[in-house]
Image (spheres, rainbow, N blue to C red):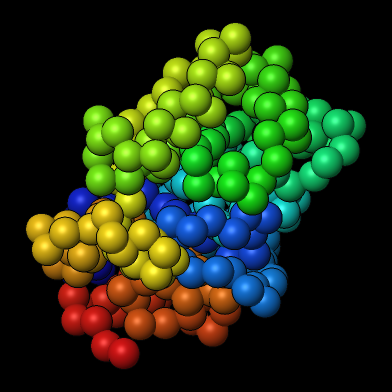
Amino acid sequence: MFHDYLKNLDRIEFAVTMACTGRCRHCSEGDHVNCTGHIDADVATDAVRKICRHFQIKSLMTFGGEPLLYPEVIYAIHQTAKEMDIPDRQLITNGYFSKSGEKISEVANKLAGCGVNDLLLSVDAFHQETIPMEPVMLFAESIVKEGIPAELSPAWLVSREDDNPYNIRTREILSQFSHLNIPVGQGNIIFPEGNALKYLGEYFSENTMTSSPYEDDPTDVRAVSFSPDGSVDLMNGNVYETDIIDLLKNYKGVVTD
């Protein structure tokens, strides 16, 4: 039914929205100016159910932009993932979607209820240039209170060990969360694309990785990745127009523009 190119498919990813509360100079997506809208929750959950009927999905991830600008979509996707017995249900967020303490606490509570069990909180010198610390800290405290497994996920410039001014500031910011005992994960090394290439070019050398480390091999697809507009990476189609299973059945490892 499905090509061997999909034999290792075990992950689903949703870029829920490209709207964002940050204006980070390291962002590979650029400035996020005039980015609005989000993937439809019903379309997303239907796709999750259908994919899980045919593939042994081990992990699902939601991210953005800032996905918690549309929390109801996040709840629906993760609740469905939980119902479909997907073990690892991951959310990546910068933690800034509201200034209201009541709203922040409510969202953390509902994230725990819908089954998020792997939350990556993006905090570093780049995010905190434009994102205030107070609501992010309150969110961090709320997810700890709710018992959501989490880790801090910083962006590092050049390498994790490099002592450039951005990394030094990132270490200072991470230390502010030490009282919460949230582990610091590997994070990611910034690659030269979008704003990073525009604003941080002096830090990249000829040996720097110039393509996204998140790109899938079209002959060994590990993840079905949805964009906010419903397009599906590598599948040459849109889930708003074509059933996800038909897109997967018709995939032959050839990507067209």
> What residue do we see at 49% from left, 38% from top?
124
The quarter in which the C terminus is drawn is bottom left
From this view, report whether residue 250 is shown above or below residue 15: below
**How far across and how far down the image is residue 196, in percent?**
38, 61
Horizontal side, residue 138 vs residue 162: left or right: right
Q: Residue furthest left?
A: 207
Q: Nearer the viewer, residue 61 or 199?
A: 199
**How far across and how far down the image is residue 101, in percent?**
86, 31
In this orientation, does residue 147 appear?
Answer: yes
> What residue do we see at 53% from left, 56% from top?
24
- Give the total number of marks visible in the rendering: 0
Q: Nearer the viewer, residue 180 or 237?
A: 180
**How far across and how far down the image is residue 153, in percent?**
45, 34
Horizontal side, residue 225 vs residue 205: left or right: right
The quarter in which the N terminus is drawn is bottom left
The quadrant in which residue 165 appears is top left
From this view, report whether residue 237 is shown above or below residue 179: below
**How far across and how far down the image is residue 183, in percent?**
45, 18
Horizontal side, residue 257 vs residue 195: left or right: left
Horizontal side, residue 5 vs residue 64: left or right: left
In this orientation, does residue 92 appear?
Answer: no
> What residue do we see at 79% from left, 34% from top?
104
> What residue do we see at 69% from left, 72% from top?
36
